[in-house]
Image (cartoon, rainbow, N blue to C red):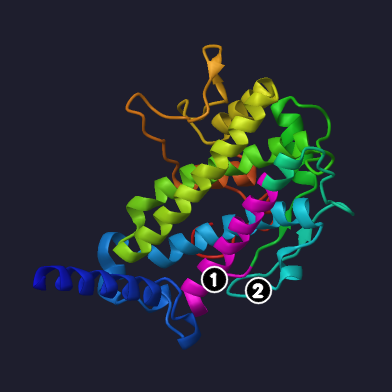
Amino acid sequence: MVHDEKVAALAAHGRRRFLQVAGGAAAAGVGISMLPSTALAQRGGLDVPVLNFALNLEYLEAEYYSFAVTGQSITNQGVGVDGLGTPGSVTIKQSPQVPFATPAIAQYAAEIERDERAHVVFLRSALGANRVARPAINLLDSFNTLAQAAGLGASFDPFANEDNFLLGAFIFEDVGVTAYKGAARLIANKDTLEAAAGILAVEAYHASNIRTTLFARGFAGPAQQISDLRDILDGAGDLDQGITANGVSNIVPTDANGLAFSRTTGQVLNIVYGNTTATPGLFFPNGLNGSIR
């Protein structure tokens, strides 16, 4: 009985510690930025830069889904976008709300939108005063450029219909999964790592949802073209995988050991910037905010 009480006490302490470090105590001014310097010094002390790098990507995803589902920015839902660095607005067409025709897909989109918006709120709270502002985001010209590069036509509007929306989401979700996995080795504090792992898991669920739906709707061809373009942008090697392989479904992209692959921050930047030199452009015309950019 005494042993059980000690275990319960330790578990409770662990939960409290996580909330204090990862945002639960944000109202009291405690966040990941307040981690002990000794913890941040381990393996380069990149916890805050890495989480700000993730926050930039979450701004992009959250805005994409928010406009697709509600027709409005995350700021219209009370989410803050202020912080360090150069703040920017979102470039997007008028009336971007997607005219979903399939109730199930509309519900998928709404659920993912809530999650991505929550990721922004969580990371901003956890980082506290060290959080970066939302940079300039382009959700208009960026897709036209990608469509041409991927061989999908001269223009591409991800908000025109639910099929286009799914293909647009496919661009983001797979990159998010590989970005979080690749950044894991840069995080020193275990509480921070656990929080990042939680977000990675959600992004993987999202990616699987999008990949499964695209496969069921017969979009293996366009998905493969997007995958091939990402492979070109992220450098040497053949990392990326479409939603089919050898003529059958490939919903979960893994290596021979059944493991998801990783991308470095540089590889991720190449994809979201749309070039192989990590030069600002495409989705982030003025670059990301923070020290990893």
Left or right for 33, reference 209: left
* Label 2 or label 1, whichever comes before in sequence order: 2
Magenta residues (range):
108-133
Left or right for 263, reference 66: left
- Residues under numbered marks 2 and 1 in contact, where contact means CB atoms less than 8 Å apart: yes
User: Which quadrant holds residue 82?
Assistant: bottom right
Q: Using the rendered image of the protein, determine whether residue 278 is visible from the camera's viewpoint.
A: yes
Residue visible at 57% across and 25% down?
A: 243
Q: Is residue 63 above or below residue 233?
A: below
Tag 1's secondary structure?
A: helix
**What residue does disc 1 label?**
124
Residue visible at 41% across and 46% down?
A: 181
Majority secondary structure in the magenta region: helix
Q: In this view, does 72 lie above or below 14?
A: above
What mark, if any, has residue 80 been given in the picture?
Answer: 2
Left or right for 268, reference 139: left
Residue visible at 25% across and 69% down?
A: 11
Q: Using the rendered image of the protein, determine whether residue 282 is visible from the camera's viewpoint.
A: no
User: Which quadrant holds residue 2?
Assistant: bottom left
Q: Residue furthest top?
A: 247
